[in-house]
Amino acid sequence: MPSTVTRGTAPVVVVLGLLCLGGAVALAWLGSLGTLHLTRNATTVNAVYEERIVGLFPISGDRIDSIVAVESVPTRTSTRSNSPNQMVFLTTSGPVNRGLSQQRFARSYVNIDTFIKDPSRSDLVVSTTYDFWETLRFWAGQLGMLFLAAVGVLTLILGIKALLPEDPRAGIGPA
């Protein structure tokens, strides 16, 4: 079956393929899995965040030392606002809020607070896969990423094939 992509439209098709691949990379990044490791030392707790693309490739990490407590801080600007509370770690040097990487674990606030208050426990690992909505976000992002990657690769192949010179001996290029 001959390609419907002409030499004139091939650059547009290649750009669309690259945009699809860029969208796939963005979805993979935004659909990353997160893990929070809490470890107790003598009198405080240390936290280490780690995010991984597809659960395999590390993309970012962060550390908060000397945590003495955690609190849930309201962020509502009015009584009609529906904003969730934010989880803030209280350290020996003041409150710490690292933004989205920290707030992804806000639904586990009770478990984190219980761990910090219980000196008999030495460590706690909280994963975003423990939360239904975070797991749903991960799978939606991964499925979207696979779809966009497939469309992007196929579109690039069609566009590049239309750009190649015709060579009947090679069996490539427009027919």
Image (spheres, rainbow, N blue to C red):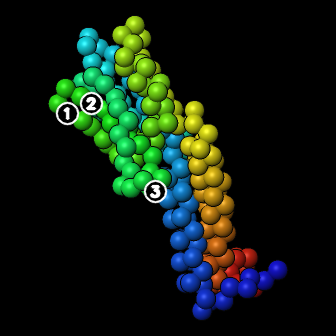
Q: Which residue is mark 3?
A: 80
Q: Are marks 1 and 2 in contact (CB under 8 Å)?
A: yes
Vertically, is 121 above or below 125?
above
Left or right relative to 61: residue 5: right
What residue is drawn where x is 53% and y is 77%? 15
Element type at marker 3? loop
* Residue at far left of view: 93
Q: Which mark is residue 1?
A: none
The residue pinned by badge 1 equals 94
Mark 1 or mark 3, earlier in chain: 3
Asked whether, in this view, residue 55 is left or right of residue 71, the answer is right
Quarter residue 102 falls in: top left
Q: Which label sits in the foreground, 1 or 3?
A: 3
Q: Which residue is mark 2?
A: 90
Residue 14 visible in image? yes
Determine crowd level at label 3: few under 14, some 14-19, many 20+ residues with C-alpha closer than 10 A.
few
- The reply to whether callout 2 and callout 3 are in contact (CB within 8 Å) is no
